[in-house]
Every structure is written in structure tokens, then in C-alpha cells.
Amino acid sequence: MSSENDRPAPPTTSASIVVLTLARTVETELNAALAPLDLTVSRLGLLGHIAAMPGTSFSELARMSGITVQSVHAAVKALAGAGLVRDNTARAGSASAIEVTPDGARLMERARAAVAEVDERLFGEAADPIQRQVGDTIRAAFSG
């Protein structure tokens, strides 16, 4: 018969694992909220980068988004096909002049509302107290 002293100690909580688990939950919730807008977290992020830095290059977008330049080209082409951005590049090889269209800006406003609903559900007043604390800490760390 084993005693309580023979039990292994509970595992140490890893901040990395907790953050990764929470990030997956957030991404799943955001993608579900953005789906009716025909957006994903990645597409919204790319739109946001373009809106914040009109005329940015494909290389800069790739670095900011953490994807390849080829993937950025494909994504921008899809966004342009949907009328959300336009690439005013005069000719192949010239500097990019990508910008969000008025339709893209309106979609981003709708997406911001969807993101705010997810934020409130996951980190607002009625959320789990620990998640609320995480949200407060993140907002405090990045405000300023």
C-alpha cells in the first residue's frame, strides 16, 4: 500500500502552455465570430496591416504577418478580388501601393465589433475571473 508521500507532485504550471491553450481558444472564438463576415483572423490581420500602413510592400506584409511573400501575394490577390483592397502598383517589379478600399474599411469596422464581442465574452465582466485578470494585464501592458 502506498502512502500520500509516494504520490508524484502535481506538474508545475507552464506559462507557455497556459498562454498557448488560451490563444487557441481565442483564435477559435474569433474565427467563429468572423466567419459570417467571410474573414479569418489571418485575413483580418492582413487587412489591418494594410490599413495601418498604406503602400506597404509585400515583403513588409510578410514579415508583419509571419508568412511568406508568396502567401501574401496570394492573400492580397484574394482580398483584391473580393474588393477589400486595391494594389495600385503601376507595373511588376515596382514598389507596392496596396490600400484598403471603402468596402474593406466597412468590413473592418464590422470585424472590430465582432472582435469586441469576443473580447467581452472571454475577458469582460462576466468572464472567468482568471481570464478577466489576463485581459486586464494584457490591456495594461500594451496601453501607452
Image (cartoon, helix red, strand yellow):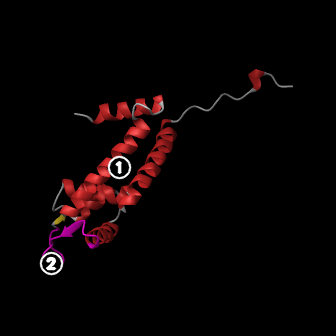
Q: Earlier in the sequence, mark 1 or mark 2?
A: 2
**Residue that numbered label 1 is attached to:** 114
- Which range of residues does the magenta coloring cover? 81-96
What is the distance, in whole Å, between disc 1 and disc 2 at their CAs?
Answer: 37 Å
Q: Residue at x 30, y 31 (%)?
A: 140
Q: Residue at x 34, y 43 (%)?
A: 116
**Image-based side of 82 in relation to 2, left or right:** left
- Check the image and report above or below for 13 versus 50: above
Q: Is residue 39 among the parts visible in the rendering? A: no
Question: Circle 1 sits in a helix, a strand or a loop, which is it?
Answer: helix
Mark 1 or mark 2, which is nearer to you? 1
Q: Residue at x 15, y 62 (%)?
A: 55
User: How far across and down, in percent of the image, does residue 2 sit?
Assistant: 83, 25
User: How far across and down, in percent of the image, does residue 60 sit?
Assistant: 24, 59
User: How far across and down, in percent of the image, does residue 121 sit?
Assistant: 42, 39
Residue type at the position of mark 1:
Ala
Q: Is residue 122 among the parts visible in the rendering? A: yes
- Check the image and report above or below for 105 versus 83: above
Label placed on residue 91:
2
Q: Residue at x 35, y 49 (%)?
A: 114
Q: Nearer the viewer, residue 53 or 112?
A: 112
